[in-house]
Image (cartoon, helix red, strand yellow):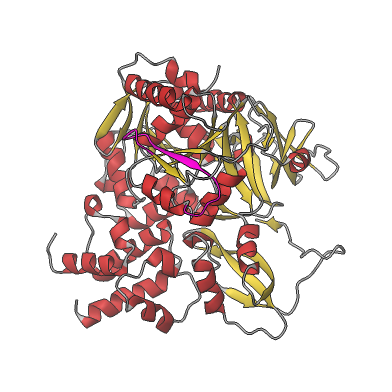
C-alpha cells in the first residue's frame, strides 16, 4: 500500500473530507481533483521531486495527493520561507515543478527571478502554469533514485547544507497505523488542524491519519488566536486537535473556559517542545473534560514515538508516555549498551517508522541510524513502569514556539557579515515561546559593531523567529582540540 | 489616535518585542506606519498573538476574532487603526 491509496480507496466516498473557510471538499472530489491534475502534469517534464508551496488549505491537500498519484516525491516548502531559503530547497532537492495556489504562484515566480534553472509553477486552483526562467534548462537530478520515498521533510542543517528526511510509504503507513491504534481514531472524528501542514507532526499524526480512517478535517483558516481556536472547536464540534505548548500557554492565559462548549473535544494532543509541569497542571485543569495527551517524536521517526494517554496524565505528569504500537525505544550509553530504568542516556528508536535516511547525505545517515536504531539526539530515562522522561538534548536544536531552529542556520547568516569572525547561537528561555535564539559573536580584528547592527542584518535574511534576540560580544570561544567551537549538550 | 493611547500601544509593542533594541530604536521604526512588525521587529505568529492579547488587556477591549486579519495587524498602521476602531466603538 502507498499513501496515495489512502485517498484512492475512498474515491467514491461522498463524505466531507476537509472543511476550510466555509468550503467543503468530499473524498470523491479530492480524489477527482488530484487525478485531473496528475493527468495534466504527467504529460509535462518534471523531475522526481515536486514542490508544494501552499498555505494550509484544501488546495494543499489537492496538491499533496496530485503528487502522490503521480508516484513522485512530495517536497513541502514553507509558504513563509524567504527567497534564499526557497531557492536553496529547489536547488538541493532538484525541483523542476512546484504546485501552488493563487497568491503564492506570483510570490514564487518573483522569488525565482535570476534563479539559474527553469521551474514550472502550476496553480492547482486555476490550472494555470507560470514558467520561471524559460530560457534556462531544468535542473538535473543528482541524487539516487529513491523510488520508495513518498515525502521529504525539512529538518536541521543550513541553507547551504540542509537535511531532508526521506520518509517512505512504509514509514508513513506504519506511523499512521500506530497513531490510529494508540488513540483509537475513528471515522466520526473531526480533527482541527492548526499546525502547519508541512510540519512532520501535522503531516502524519493529523492529516494522513484522519484521512486513513475516513474522518473529517477542519483546517483553521488564519493565524492562531486563542479565542478563535476555542470558538472553532465549539462551532465545528471538533473531536480532537494537536498543538504545540506555546499555543496552550496562550489559551490558558487569555481565555475563559466557561465561554465555550468544548464537550465534543475527545482529546487534545501536544508535543514539539518542553512543557513545564506547573503549566501542564493548568492545562489539565482548563481542559478537564478532554483527554490531554502529551506526545514525543521527531521528523526522522515519521514522527510519533511515544504518547502519554489521558488515564496516566496526572499519575505520570512530566513523562512523555510509552512507545506507541510498532515502535521500540531504548535508552543507551555512548557504547550503545541498553541502560536499566532510572538511568539517563540517549533515546534510540526502532521500527518501520524510522526514516530511510537524509537525502544525499549517506554519511550523516550512517551515523544517525545504526543497526536499525535511530539516534534521536535526546536524553531520557525510563521509570520502572516503562514510562519515558525526557532529560535533555544532545543535538544542537532550539525549539521555539514548537518549531525547530537550527543554530547553524543562524550562524551561517552571521558569518556572512563582513565584521563577524565567529558566531555561536544558543537558546535562552522565553515564557511563551519556551526558547529563543541568542548569538555570541567574535568580531574581526579592528571591526566595530553593535548588537542593533547585527540584529538588523539578521532581520533582512532570516524569518522573525530565527533572528537572535540579542547579541553578546565575546573575545574567544572554548574550542575542541580540532579547533571547532565547543557546543554543550543541554540538560532539562 | 490620542497621544496617550498611541504611547500605550508603542509601549506594549516594546514590551513584547524580544529583540534587544533600545526603545528609541523601536519607536523610530514605528514612525513609519508601514513598518512590518514581523519583518522589522522580529515578531513571529506567536508573539503577534501575545501582542494582541496584551493590547486587549492594556486597553480593556476585545478584538472580534472573526474580524482579525493578522496580515493587516502585523503592519503598525493597520494595528493602530484596528485598536483605534475598537476604542471608538466602531466594531
Counting labels gives 0
Q: In which quarter of the image is the C terminus of chain A?
A: bottom right
Choose between A259 and B4: the one closer to the eye: B4
Identify the image quadrant of residue B15.
bottom left
Does the magenta segment cover residue A116? Answer: yes
- Outermost residue on the front side: it is A135
Q: Is residue B57 above or below residue A139?
A: below
Q: Is residue B46 above or below residue A321?
A: below
Choose between A28 and B6: the one closer to the eye: A28
Is residue A323 at all visible to an observer of this figure? no
Q: Position of residue A23 (x, y in %)?
A: 26, 33
Q: Where is residue A463 in the image (x, y as percent from the top left)?
A: 49, 59
Q: Is residue A354 above or below residue A421?
A: above
Residue drawn at x 52%, y 50% is A86
Identify the image quadrant of residue A328.
top right
Residue drawn at x 29%, y 77% is B8
Q: Is residue A215 above or below residue A23?
A: above
Residue drawn at x 29%, y 80% is B7
Q: Where is residue A347 in the image (x, y as percent from the top left)?
A: 71, 41
Is residue A137 rendered to the left or right of residue A66?
right
Choose between A179 and A113: the one closer to the eye: A113
Q: In which quarter of the image is the N terminus of chain A?
A: top right
Is residue A459 at all visible to an observer of this figure? yes
Is residue A276 rendered to the left or right of residue A381?
left
Residue drawn at x 72%, y 83% is A445
Please, what is the dominant secondary structure of the magenta stretch? Answer: loop
Q: Where is residue B23 in the image (x, y as percent from the top left)?
A: 42, 81
Part of the protein shown in magenta: A113-129
Is residue B29 rendered to the left or right of residue A94?
left
Does the magenta segment cover residue A256? Answer: no
Amino acid at each position: 500500500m502507498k499513501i496515495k491509496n489512502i485517498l484512492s480507496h475512498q474515491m467514491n466516498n461522498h463524505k466531507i473530507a476537509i472543511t476550510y473557510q466555509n468550503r467543503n471538499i468530499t473524498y470523491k472530489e479530492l480524489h477527482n481533483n488530484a487525478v485531473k491534475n496528475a493527468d495534466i502534469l504527467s504529460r509535462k517534464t518534471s523531475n522526481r521531486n515536486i514542490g508544494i508551496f501552499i498555505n494550509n488549505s484544501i488546495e494543499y491537500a489537492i496538491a499533496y495527493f496530485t503528487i502522490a498519484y503521480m508516484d513522485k516525491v512530495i517536497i513541502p516548502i514553507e509558504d513563509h520561507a524567504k527567497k534564499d531559503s526557497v531557492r536553496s530547497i529547489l536547488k538541493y532537492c532538484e525541483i523542476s515543478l512546484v504546485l501552488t495556489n493563487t497568491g503564492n504562484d506570483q510570490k514564487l515566480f518573483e522569488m525565482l527571478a535570476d534563479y539559474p534553472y527553469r521551474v514550472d509553477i502550476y496553480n492547482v486552483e486555476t490550472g494555470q502554469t507560470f514558467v520561471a526562467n524559460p530560457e534556462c534548462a531544468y535542473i538535473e537530478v543528482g541524487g539516487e533514485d529513491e523510488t520508495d520515498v513518498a515525502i521529504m521533510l525539512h529538518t536541521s542543517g543550513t541553507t547551504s547544507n540542509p537535511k531532508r528526511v526521506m520518509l517512505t510509504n512504509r514509514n508513513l503507513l506504519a506511523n499512521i497505523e500506530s497513531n490510529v491504534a494508540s488513540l483509537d481514531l475513528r471515522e466520526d472524528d473531526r480533527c482541527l488542524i492548526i499546525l502547519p501542514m508541512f510540519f512532520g507532526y501535522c503531516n502524519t499524526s493529523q492529516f494522513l491519519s484522519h484521512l486513513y480512517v475516513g474522518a473529517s478535517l477542519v483546517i483553521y483558516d488564519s493565524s492562531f488566536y486563542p479565542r478563535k481556536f476555542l470558538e472553532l472547536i465549539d462551532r465545528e464540534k471538533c473531536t480532537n486537535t494537536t498543538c504545540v505548548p506555546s499555543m496552550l500557554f496562550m489559551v490558558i492565559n487569555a481565555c475563559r473556559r466557561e465561554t465555550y462548549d468544548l464537550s465534543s473535544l475527545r482529546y487534545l494532543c501536544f508535543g514539539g517542545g518542553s512543557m513545564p509541569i506547573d503549566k501542564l497542571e493548568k492545562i489539565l485543569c482548563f481542559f478537564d473534560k478532554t483527554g490531554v495527551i502529551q506526545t514525543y517524536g521527531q521528523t526522522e521517526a515519521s514522527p510519533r514515538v511515544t504518547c502519554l494517554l489521558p488515564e496516566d496524565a496526572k499519575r505520570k505528569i512530566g513523562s512523555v508516555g510509552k512507545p506507541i504500537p510498532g515502535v521500540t525505544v531504548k535508552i543507551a550509553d555512548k557504547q550503545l549498551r541498553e541502560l536499566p530504568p532510572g538511568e539517563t542516556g540517549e533515546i534510540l528508536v526502532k521500527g518501520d517508522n524510522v526514516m530511510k535516511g537524509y537525502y544525499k547525505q549517506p554519511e550523516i545517515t550512517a551515523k544517525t541510524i545504526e543497526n536499525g536504531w535511530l539516534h534521536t539526539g535526546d536524553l531520557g530515562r525510563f521509570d520502572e513502569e516503562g514510562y519515558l522522561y525526557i532529560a535533555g538534548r544532545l543535538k544542537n536544536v532550539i525549539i521555539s514556539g514548537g518549531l525547530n531552529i537550527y543554530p547553524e542556520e543562524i550562524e551561517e547568516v552571521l558569518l556572512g557579515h563582513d565584521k563577524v569572525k565567529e558566531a555561536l547561537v544558543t537558546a535562552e528561555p522565553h515564557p511563551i515561546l519556551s526558547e529563543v535564539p541568542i548569538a555570541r559573536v567574535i568580531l574581526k580584528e579592528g571591526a566595530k559593531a553593535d548588537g542593533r547592527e547585527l540584529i538588523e542584518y539578521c532581520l533582512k535574511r532570516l524569518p522573525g523567529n530565527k533572528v537572535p534576540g540579542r547579541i553578546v560580544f565575546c573575545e574567544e570561544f572554548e574550542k575542541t582540540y580540532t579547533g571547532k567551537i565547543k557546543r554543550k549538550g543541554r540538560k532539562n | 489616535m490620542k497621544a496617550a493611547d498611541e504611547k500605550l500601544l508603542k509601549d506594549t509593542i516594546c514590551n513584547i518585542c524580544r529583540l534587544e533594541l533600545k526603545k528609541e530604536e523601536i519607536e523610530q521604526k514605528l514612525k513609519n506606519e508601514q513598518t512590518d512588525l514581523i519583518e522589522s521587529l522580529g515578531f513571529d505568529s506567536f508573539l503577534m498573538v501575545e501582542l494582541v492579547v496584551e493590547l486587549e488587556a492594556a486597553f480593556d477591549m476585545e478584538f472580534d476574532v472573526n474580524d482579525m486579519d493578522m496580515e493587516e495587524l502585523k503592519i503598525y498602521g493597520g494595528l493602530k487603526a484596528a485598536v483605534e476602531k475598537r476604542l471608538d466603538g466602531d466594531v
